[in-house]
Image (spheres, rainbow, N blue to C red):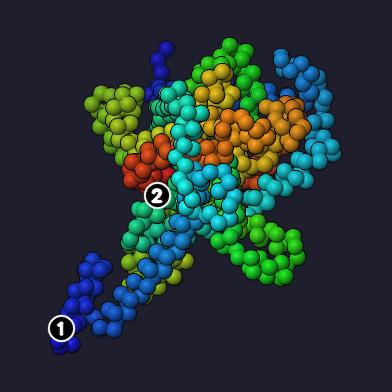
């Protein structure tokens, strides 16, 4: 093979590697050097990311591994990752304790309905802040930002008294009403997301809608909201997941039903497992059963996230959250 | 009555944001006010939430009589802040930058880094503590010899702090999912023409990072700093937050039942003031470094 031939082939591979940016006239050493550097830097980046990803996954892997172990095994220093024998009974026990037939419908309802309300209300308010003339807009929006840094838990007592005084304690309404008004779990953040998204859409959309005879609400509902799917995806996933994981609201307002919300059920399971050592002969709830319960608990949000991951990330990029 | 066009627009605009304003007045302003009043009271009849006026004594108690609030809980919270915020900021920027530069598996890694945001809830995090994650990580990173060397080199407090920091690292990194995502979106929004121009002028990757990427990403860095501070101060595992909650809702610190909503409200207000001051100080100082493309320095 002649030198020229080798060079041609190298140029070809290099070109394939970096999508046609290789020039035919560059000396061989430059091509080799540039590609080598590229490959090495990619390899280093991959190694770094791989290590970090592993550190991120260790807790989850360790949790899944331990969910199959017996209790003595999790303190056994010779067993680290792979259980000596797989105890699938942990899962059936956890599922029985969590009582999925009863708790799952309630949990899904408590997550889905508020997050739907939040999408509607926060997009409405966000649209108002982004596009319409609002008196005292600056002041109102800085109040929105301010609510973001008030931890809602610190207001639990007065808010509860408020609902009790109007007779709404022990109903789901104290969870639903804030969401319908653009508040609720991190409502301020969702208003900001929608505001940023609507701000970057072209004004011609509204002008055309007005020429065609839409009023502001019709413009919002029929033109702007359908365009906002990236923002809607982001907000509804966040809202669903944070609701699924939230303990404060569900434990305070749902009264006797509170214990059937999955996250509280899991907490009760934890307390039962905690006490297990003390009272011998009680129901056989060990720590490993609780860990299996945790795995069951994270499964639905995990599946939801894996299904929507691409649309979600794209949504974050397109909401212009970062401007 | 006839409205001018501009008045009509104002009315319509206000209608759009009115749900939020209504919610703010009913669900936030009035509870804020009653919690402020509550912070000057001592509840005597729990059932009806009626109490006696005690003036500033709830506030004074936090400074003079509470052995936990300032020396233990606030200290833990601020330690977490000083440890977590720099780590999360550096880590999320680095990870996002690497992610934006890799060809292989960027999507896969992105999914992993965001996973904790989806999964982290109270009981599950407790479950992870059961799974003994802290010591697992520690044994990966810090071998016994390394720890011995540390203890030889530093005073026990410093060495203990370092070992503690290492063992908490995964759980701190777990809190950086949102920040990574925001940085990634930010990198995407930087026009590639800057990089092309810099490459023509012979800039290296390193120079481009410091002179193009970093300045243009400062607005997002600002958002991320604020988000991380709020997240660290108000998260469910912040020890001050749970301490305040014990007083407000009634909870056990060890075997002792703590329940005193008036005192809890006073603590809450002081804590909120502290968060506000921290954020104010950070914003004022950070603003100088933030670079907005649209702005002109006249």
Q: From the viewer's perspective, is residue B277 above or below residue A128?
A: below
Q: Position of residue A101 (x, y in %)?
A: 42, 24
Q: Residue at x 14, y 87 (%)?
A: A1
SS for tag 1?
A: helix
Find residue A169 and report its image quarter: top right
Find residue B68 and report its image quarter: top right
Q: Disc number at residue A100? A: none
Inter-mark Cα distance, 1 to 2: 43 Å
Residue toward you, B87 or A199: B87
Direction right: furthest residue = B64
Q: Circle 2: is it few (<14), some (14-19), or many (20+) Cα within 10 Å?
A: some
Residue toward you, A156 or A224: A156
The answer for which chain carries disc 1 is: A
Q: Are marks 1 and 2 on the same chain?
A: no
Residue toward you, B114 or A34: B114
Q: Position of residue A221 (x, y in %)?
A: 32, 26
Residue indicated by mark 1: A5
Q: State the quadrant of the N terminus of chain B.
A: top left
Q: Position of residue A286 (x, y in %)?
A: 57, 37
Q: Residue at x 61, y 29 (%)?
A: A282
Q: Residue at x 41, y 18 (%)?
A: B3
Residue indicated by mark 2: B111
Question: From this viewpoint, is residue B271 visible?
Answer: yes
Q: Position of residue A7 (x, y in %)?
A: 20, 82
Question: From this viewpoint, is residue A109 visible?
Answer: no
């Amino acid at each position: 093979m002649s030198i020229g031939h080798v060079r041609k082939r190298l140029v070809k591979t290099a070109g394939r590697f970096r999508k046609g940016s290789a020039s035919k006239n560059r000396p061989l050493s430059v091509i080799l050097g540039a590609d080598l550097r590229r490959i090495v830097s990619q390899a280093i980046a991959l190694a770094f990311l791989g290590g970090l990803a592993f550190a991120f996954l260790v807790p989850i892997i360790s949790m899944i591994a331990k969910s199959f172990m017996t209790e003595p095994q999790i303190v056994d220093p010779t067993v680290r990752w792979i259980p000596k024998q797989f105890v699938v009974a942990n899962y059936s026990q956890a599922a029985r304790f969590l009582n999925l037939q009863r708790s799952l419908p309630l949990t899904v309802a408590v997550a889905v309905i508020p997050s739907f309300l939040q999408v509607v209300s926060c997009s409405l308010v966000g649209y108002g802040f982004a596009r319409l003339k609002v008196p005292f807009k600056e002041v109102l929006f800085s109040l929105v930002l301010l609510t973001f840094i008030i931890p809602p838990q610190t207001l639990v007592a007065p808010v509860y008294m408020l609902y009790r005084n109007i007779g709404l304690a022990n109903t789901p309404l104290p969870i639903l009403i804030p969401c319908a008004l653009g508040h609720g779990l991190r409502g301020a953040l969702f208003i900001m997301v929608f505001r940023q998204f609507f701000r970057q859409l072209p004004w011609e959309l509204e002008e055309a809608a007005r020429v065609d005879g839409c009023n502001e609400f019709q413009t919002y509902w029929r033109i702007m909201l359908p365009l906002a799917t990236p923002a809607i995806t982001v907000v509804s996933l966040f809202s669903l997941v944070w609701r699924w994981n939230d303990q404060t609201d569900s434990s305070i307002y749902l009264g006797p039903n509170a214990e059937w919300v999955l996250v509280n059920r899991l907490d009760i399971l934890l307390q039962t497992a905690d006490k297990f050592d003390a009272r011998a002969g009680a129901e056989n709830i060990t720590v490993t059963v609780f860990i299996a319960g945790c795995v069951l608990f994270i499964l639905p949000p995990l599946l939801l996230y894996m299904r929507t991951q691409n649309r979600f990330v794209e949504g974050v990029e397109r909401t212009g959250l970062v401007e | 009555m006839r409205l001018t066009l501009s008045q009509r627009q104002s009315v319509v605009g206000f209608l759009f944001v009115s749900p939020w304003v209504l919610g703010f007045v009913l669900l936030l302003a009035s509870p804020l006010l009653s919690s402020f009043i509550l912070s000057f009271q001592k509840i005597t009849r729990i059932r009806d939430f009626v109490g006696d006026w005690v003036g500033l004594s709830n506030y004074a108690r936090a400074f003079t009589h509470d052995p936990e609030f300032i020396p233990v809980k606030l200290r833990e919270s601020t330690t977490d802040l000083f440890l977590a915020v720099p780590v999360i900021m550096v880590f999320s920027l680095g990870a996002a930058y690497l992610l934006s530069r890799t060809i292989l598996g960027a999507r896969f890694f992105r999914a992993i880094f965001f996973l904790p945001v989806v999964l982290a809830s109270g009981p599950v995090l407790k479950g992870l503590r059961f799974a003994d994650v802290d010591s697992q990580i520690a044994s990966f990173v810090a071998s016994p010899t390394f720890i011995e060397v540390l203890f030889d080199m530093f005073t026990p407090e410093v060495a203990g702090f370092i070992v503690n920091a290492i063992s908490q690292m995964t759980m701190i990194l777990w809190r950086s999912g949102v920040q990574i995502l925001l940085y990634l979106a930010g990198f995407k929004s930087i026009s590639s023409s800057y990089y092309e121009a810099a490459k023509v002028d012979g800039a290296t990757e390193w120079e481009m990072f410091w002179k193009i990427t970093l300045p243009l990403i400062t607005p997002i860095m600002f958002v991320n700093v604020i988000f991380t501070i709020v997240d660290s101060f108000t998260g469910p595992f912040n020890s001050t937050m749970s301490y305040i909650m014990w007083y407000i809702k009634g909870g056990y610190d060890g075997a002792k039942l703590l329940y005193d909503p008036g005192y809890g409200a006073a603590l809450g207000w002081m804590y909120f003031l502290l968060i506000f001051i921290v954020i104010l100080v950070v914003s004022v100082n950070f603003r100088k470094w933030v670079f907005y493309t649209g702005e002109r320095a006249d």
